[in-house]
Image (cartoon, rainbow, N blue to C red):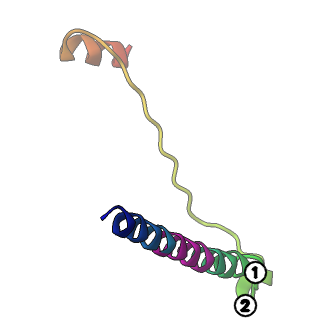
Amino acid sequence: MEKQLSTAMAILGLLLALGMSSAAFILGVQAKKAVSGQQLITVKGLAVKDVQADNAEWTVTISVTEPTFAQGLNKLRA
């Protein structure tokens, strides 16, 4: 019984090591493919033409902290 248990553990360890090695290999290949695609940028078309902007949008945020709404509104108006 002791010999069967040790044989089963050895097989389990071998399969686990094989699976982890395979996963690391696949992950490495995919990471290499993902990085190589980000090294080249191609710009065509209107990128060489100067364009004048005729519209702009600005966002402004103002905040006031007061105990009541009326006091806060008065402080904003002042």
* Residue 76: percent from left, percent from top: 36, 19
Q: In this view, does 69 lie above or below 50?
A: above
Which residue range is magenta in the image? 15-26
Q: At which x and y percent is residue 61?
A: 43, 34
Q: Which residue is farthest bottom? A: 45
Q: What's the residue at 58%, 80% (across, down)?
A: 26
Q: Main secondary structure of the magenta part?
A: helix
User: From the viewer's perspective, is residue 53 above or below residue 49?
Assistant: above
What amino acid is found at the position of numbered circle 2 in the picture?
Gly
Q: Which residue is drawn at 65% across and 74% down?
A: 28
- Marking on residue 45: 2
Give the quarter of the figure containing the N terminus: bottom left
- Number of residue marks: 2
Viewport quadrant of the C terminus: top left
- Going by the image, does 9 lie left or right of 32? left
Q: What element carries label 2?
A: loop
Label 1 packing within 10 angstroms: few (<14), some (14-19), many (20+): few
Nearer the observer, 56 or 24 = 24
**Which residue occupies 69% across, 82% down?**
37
Which amino acid lies under the numbered mark 1 shown in the image of this protein? Ile
Mark 1: which secondary structure? loop
Q: Which of 66 and 33 is in front in this view?
A: 33
Question: Can you identify the residue that label 1 sits on?
Answer: 41
Is 20 within the magenta? yes
Quadrant hosting residue 51: bottom right
47 left or right, relative to 22: right
10 Å crowding of disc 2: few (<14), some (14-19), many (20+): few
Picture coordinates of residue 32, whole percent (x, y): 69, 77
**What is the residue that sits farthest to the right in this orientation?**
48
Q: Do the residues labelled 1 and 2 touch (CB within 8 Å)?
A: no
